[in-house]
Image (cartoon, rainbow, N blue to C red):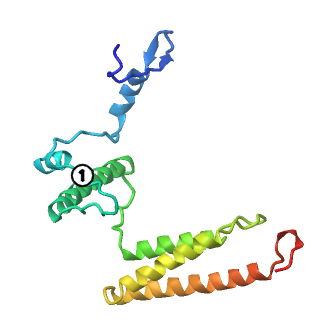
């Protein structure tokens, strides 16, 4: 076997008859029972082939060129198709489950909000000491502030209210937490 060929290791599984089966043979009957996620190599389009052959500009201090609008549309189309295939597989595995909810702006706000709360120690099981990442919480709150600035005038009234309320509450919790931290004596009994 030369070094350029990929090495494939098979795990032998003993059966009741005592003859070993490869892992692939063992998995084959299970694959027929229910749909599984399969990676399929898609044929390359002209755009993808062109992207592979174009040289990249690696000059120091320059930003790489962003994707063209055609590249972005093509990538978005592929992403949407892949998402649909994934959703079909999930529905096949869980026939009674409701359809997956479309992700919107409120989900982004909720994700950042929950992350900041967790970083400030929320969700700690009772009887355990909270694990606080105050610097991480500050960064997450600052990200929400940037989001608020950059989306000003572009949100629906409900989206703006959601963002404003979440940011207000997080900042209040942060202020309370930093006050509590500053009142605690520093480790080792040293005075500030």
Q: Residue 61 occupies which quadrant of the picture?
A: bottom left
* 123 left or right of 112 in image: right
**Direction left: furthest residue:** 46
- For image coordinates 64% across by 73% down, the residue present is 134
Q: Say if 62 sits above or below 34 in the image.
A: below
Check the image and report above or below for 74 versus 170: above
Q: Residue at x 47, y 79 (%)?
A: 144
Image coordinates of residue 131 in percent, x first then y, are 70, 65
On screen, residue 69 above or below 8: below
Q: Quadrant of the N terminus?
A: top left
Element at label 1: loop
Looking at the image, residue 124 sits to the left or right of residue 154; the answer is right
Judge left or right: residue 39 versus residue 173: left
What is the count of numbered marks? 1
Dot 1: few (<14), some (14–19), or many (≥20) neighbours within 10 Å? few
Whether 28 is drawn above or below 54: the answer is above
Judging depth in this view, the residue of 189 and 159 nearest the camera is: 189
Q: Which residue in the rendered view is the most extreme toward the front? A: 60
Q: Please tell me which residue is depicted at 69% across the width and 84% down the height of the picture.
A: 176
Query: x, y percentage for residue 162?
Result: 45, 84
Q: Position of residue 65 (x, y in %)?
A: 24, 62
Pick the residue in front: 63 or 179.
63
Tell me where residue 168 sits by quadrant.
Answer: bottom right
Quickly name the residue at label 1: 56
Q: Which residue sits furthest right?
A: 189
Q: Could you tell me residue 68's position as x and y percent?
A: 18, 63
- Specify the quadrant that holds the C terminus: bottom right
């Amino acid at each position: 076997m030369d070094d350029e060929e990929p090495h494939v290791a098979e795990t032998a599984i003993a059966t009741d008859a005592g003859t070993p089966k490869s892992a692939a043979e063992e998995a084959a009957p299970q694959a027929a029972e229910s749909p599984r996620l399969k990676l399929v190599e898609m044929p390359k389009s002209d755009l993808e082939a062109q992207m592979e052959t174009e040289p990249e500009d690696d000059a120091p201090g320059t930003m790489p060129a962003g994707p063209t609008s055609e590249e972005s549309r093509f990538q978005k189309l592929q992403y949407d198709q892949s998402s649909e295939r994934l959703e079909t597989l999930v529905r096949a595995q869980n026939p009674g489950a409701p359809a997956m909810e479309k992700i919107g702006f409120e989900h982004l706000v909720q994700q950042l909000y929950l992350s900041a709360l967790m970083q400030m120690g929320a969700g700690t099981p009772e009887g355990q000491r909270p694990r606080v990442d105050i610097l991480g919480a500050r960064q997450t709150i600052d990200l929400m502030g940037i989001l608020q600035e950059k989306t000003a005038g572009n949100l629906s009234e409900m989206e703006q209210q959601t963002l404003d309320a979440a940011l207000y509450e997080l900042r209040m919790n942060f202020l309370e937490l930093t006050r509590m931290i500053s009142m605690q004596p520093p480790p080792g009994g040293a005075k500030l």
